[in-house]
Amino acid sequence: MKEININTINETINSRSNEVNYQLKREFSAISSRRKNNKIRSKGEVEALDLICIQKWNRAVEEGKIKRLGERELYYEFD
């Protein structure tokens, strides 16, 4: 049977503690596996939100808050 000194055990634990803690955080963290919101919107809600967004966009165009910076790049000045 192999004899192990308590100091050797403590040194081993202290030398690997950062690595083990990082591995535990990565495996059990909620950050590593983000939860997605799977709320399904009704057809009426989708249409209403689309209408609101289109109206906001058209209002911003009329007020001159949207500027074309390039062929595929826009600048939107918001308050």
Image (tube, rainbow, N blue to C red):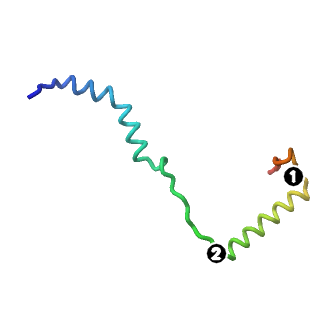
With respect to residue 79, does 19 lie above or below? Answer: above
Question: Disc 2 on helix, strand or loop?
Answer: loop
- Residue 34 drawn at (x, y percent): 51, 52
With respect to residue 23, does 4 lie above or below? Answer: above
Horizontal side of residue 57 vs 28, given as left or right? right
Q: Residue at x 16, y 23 (%)?
A: 5
The quadrant holding residue 26 is top left
Horizontal side of residue 79 vs 45, given as left or right? right
| Outermost residue, bottom side | 44
Q: Residue at x 82, y 50 (%)?
A: 76
Horizontal side of residue 27 vs 42, given as left or right? left
The quadrant holding residue 11 is top left
- Residue flagged by tag 1: what amino acid is it? Lys
Q: On the image, numbered disc 2 is attached to which residue?
A: 42
Q: Earlier in the sequence, mark 2 or mark 1?
A: 2
- Residue 79 drawn at (x, y percent): 80, 51
**Do the CB atoms of the residues marked 2 and 1 lie less than 8 Å apart?**
no
- Residue flagged by tag 2: what amino acid is it? Ser
> Callout 1: 10 Å neighbours few (<14), some, many (20+)?
some
Please state which of the two labelled residues, at mark 2 or mark 1, is closer to the viewer: 2
Q: On the image, numbered disc 1 is attached to which residue?
A: 65
Residue 14 marker: none
